Image (cartoon, rainbow, N blue to C red):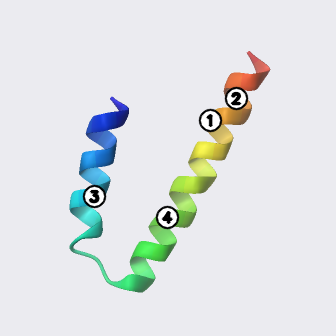
Amino acid sequence: MLIVFYEDTKFSLEKKTLKQTKREVKRFLKGTLGLVRFLRHL
């Protein structure tokens, strides 16, 4: 699932402007941090 998500992200990043890409990266990092925190609580 993560690999599919990565491929999807890579594909979409190639089409985007730098500003949009930065926003995507921030959102992705936020999501990753949230996931890590969530898993730690389990």
Amino acid bearing label 2:
Phe
Q: CA distance from mark 1 to mark 3?
A: 20 Å
Amino acid bearing label 1:
Leu
Contact check, label 4 and label 2, Cβ < 8 Å: no
Q: CA distance from mark 4 to mark 3?
A: 11 Å
* Label of residue 10 in the image: 3
What x and y, as percent, mark residue 23? 50, 72
* Label of residue 35 in the image: 1
What x and y, as percent, mark residue 22? 49, 75
Quarter occupied by residue 11: bottom left
Q: Residue at x 37, y 34 (%)?
A: 2
Mark 4 residue crowding within 10 angstroms, few (<14) / some (14–19) / many (20+): few
Q: CA distance from mark 4 to mark 1?
A: 15 Å
Label 3 SS: helix
* Label of residue 25 in the image: 4
Q: CA distance from mark 1 to mark 2?
A: 5 Å
**Sequence-wise, which precedes: disc 4 or disc 2?**
4
* Label of residue 38 in the image: 2
What x and y, as percent, mark residue 36? 67, 34
Q: CA distance from mark 4 to mark 2?
A: 20 Å
Contact check, label 3 and label 2, Cβ < 8 Å: no
